[in-house]
Amino acid sequence: MTLTPTADQPLVIVGAGPIGLAAAAHAHRRGLPVVVLEAGEVGHAVADWGHVRLFSPWSELVDPVAGELLAGTGWQAPDPQQLPDGAEWVTSYLRPLAGALADAGVDLRTGHRVVGLAREGRDRLVANGRDEVPFAVHVRGPRGHEVLRAAAVIDASGTWGQPGPLGTDGYPAIGETDHAAAISYAVPDVDDRAVRERYAGRHVAVAGAGASAQNTLVALGRLADEAGTRVTWLLRRGETGNAFGGGDNDELAARGALGNRARQVASSDAVATVTGFRTAAVARGADDRLVLTATDGREVTGVDEVVAVTGFRPDLSWLAEVHLDLDGELSSPSRLAPEIHPAHHSCGTVSPHGADLLRQPEQGLYLAGMKSYGRAPSFLALTGFEQVRSIVAEVAGDHASAARVELTLPETGVCGAGPAYDDTAGGCCGAPEPLTVGTAATAR
């Protein structure tokens, strides 16, 4: 049974992003002592991709309980139909919410990185009495290494900062680390002067097939028109297939529009598309420019810069001393994996889920937000808000409320499936049609 949070053993939330702060708002509403630990500043991961516009409108980006807390401070809610970018989400919602939580007595500590989690006095091998002692949360902060006691822990630390590599076997390609200065793992902000100078008039290789790749193509397409940038788009799959999503059929109109724009850029003279390219090595050629070599020996030469937008993965290193039940492919909670794995749910709906699918064998530990999806894409902020509502209810002992999970996701033509090796069908969905799938809260 989960321990009851007290002042000495509070609920600890890891991460002060949209989902972590929503969890704190729900905990505060229920009167639970809570500490929020954030490695950087509030919403720092969102701020890192602040130039990217979200697919979801404001009406889907404000947790209801957090919104009520903010309303009591005189906060004016943004236009519910508008689509903010990441920077606006931070400045108009996340920072005000953090301030309101702090004013309400929530202990929110920025600059505190969680580096380890265990049961107090027990490593992973000690099974006896684990559920009877609090968690030991190891934190590195301004005062050095500290250990906090916690009755329960919600890991809402996300996956930002753990990008997938350019190499296609899960590890960096040969030479990828050596040439890291020429490789970026995020959508470029071409309105930033330094970024613009980096890519203007250059030959840029873009690896990836998701929304981040679409955003990158659109951004570099602007530089192609304005500054002569040339793009080689590298796809691991056998054809472009449904890489542009559902287009006009996408119920998230902004995402459909992005796919249509990316399709136009990809068909322009500025972009060369290379399919079935699985990068094995990165090296410098005789002209001192990069040469990318595929596993089948093909080469892309004369490359100045690489943008690898190949997804993200969770950091599990600080969870090494607690008992986890994670899917072997996705690193998501095992019971959730069949609902979000594109190879299994056939692009259907993500079933309503909360504490029941997210709790770990280590009683009182829950994965939430993007962290709960592991390596799977297609996550909505709405999903995270409902997750933490249910989790906090369970931590508070309100099991009836924890079990009442309601989740409605918009229909989408985006498959998001990882194609089979050298697949030519483009994933599980085939041609884009109106479909329902768990969808990304951001373009990342």
Image: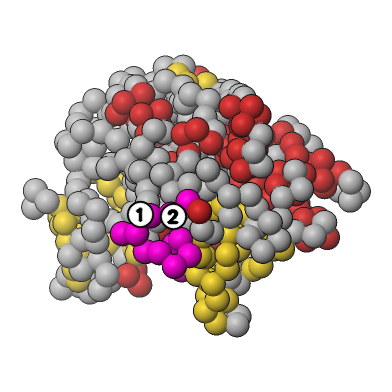
Q: In this view, does 13 lie above or below 381?
A: below
Residue 139 lies, in percent from the top left, at 53, 71
Q: In this view, does 241 lie above or below 155?
A: above
Q: Which mark is residue 127?
A: 1
Residue in view at x 34 percent, y 22 percent = 346
Q: Residue furthest left?
A: 297
* Quadrant of the image occupied by residue 30: top right
Q: Which mark is residue 26?
A: none
Q: Is residue 224 visible?
A: no
Q: Give the range drawn in magenta.
A: 115-131
Q: Which residue lies furthest to the front in this view?
A: 128
Q: What residue type is labelled 2?
A: Arg
CB under 8 Å between callouts 2 and 1? yes
Residue 363 lies, in percent from the top left, at 48, 47
- Pick the front one: 80 or 338: 338
Q: Can residue 347 be seen in this view?
A: yes
- Pick the front one: 252 or 312: 312
Residue in view at x 25 percent, y 73 percent = 178
Q: Which mark is residue 130?
A: 2
